[in-house]
Image (cartoon, grey):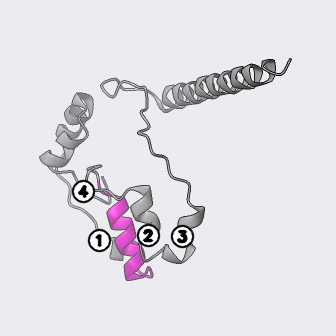
Amino acid sequence: MEITGRPSSEDIEAIQSSLATTMLDSLPPSKAKSLKEIFPTASEDALDLLDRLLQFNPEKRLTAEEALKHPYVAQFQNDDDEPVCNKTINITMDDNHKFSIREYREKLYSDIHKRKKELRKKILQSHHSYFSKYK
């Protein structure tokens, strides 16, 4: 918020979290700082990319694919070598509950570990099914 300023009501509504709305409504109004002042030696392309990535509203923020096509990083982008996730990733945490950083981290790691275990089990089952045909 120190850089981007207090989000508009529309931007706060876009995240669809009553806890976040309550917390943000309690903040005093603040004005966005100029990225040029914070990063005086950054190129215009770098400042533009930062501005587009630091949008509070997820609908206004660049996606990973859009960011990779931005002129600032375009020289590193290779369409033939960019993995793409074609499904939505949902974080299974209640946005209306305030977690400590430690609790949030532990929950995310636990969910990732659980998902990896499920995938490994699925792969092993498919291998078992495949090889059992040839016994």
Mark positioned earlier in the residue sequence (4 or 2): 4
Residue 66 % position (x, y)? 39, 63
State the residue position of label 2.
69
Camera-near label (4 vs 2) is: 2
Left/right of residue 41 with respect to residue 81 in the rendered view: left
Residue 77 % position (x, y)? 54, 70
User: At numbered mark 1, what does the secondary structure look like: helix, strand or loop?
Assistant: loop
Left/right of residue 38 with respect to residue 20 in the rendered view: right
Mark positioned earlier in the residue sequence (3 or 2): 2
Residue 39 appearing in the image: no
Residue 24 % position (x, y)? 22, 40
Report the amino acid beneath label 4: Gly
Front-most of residues 8 and 57: 57
Q: Which segment is the magenta one?
A: 37-55
State the residue position of label 4.
5
Report the amino acid beneath label 3: Gln
Left/right of residue 85 with respect to residue 32 in the rendered view: right
State the residue position of label 3.
77
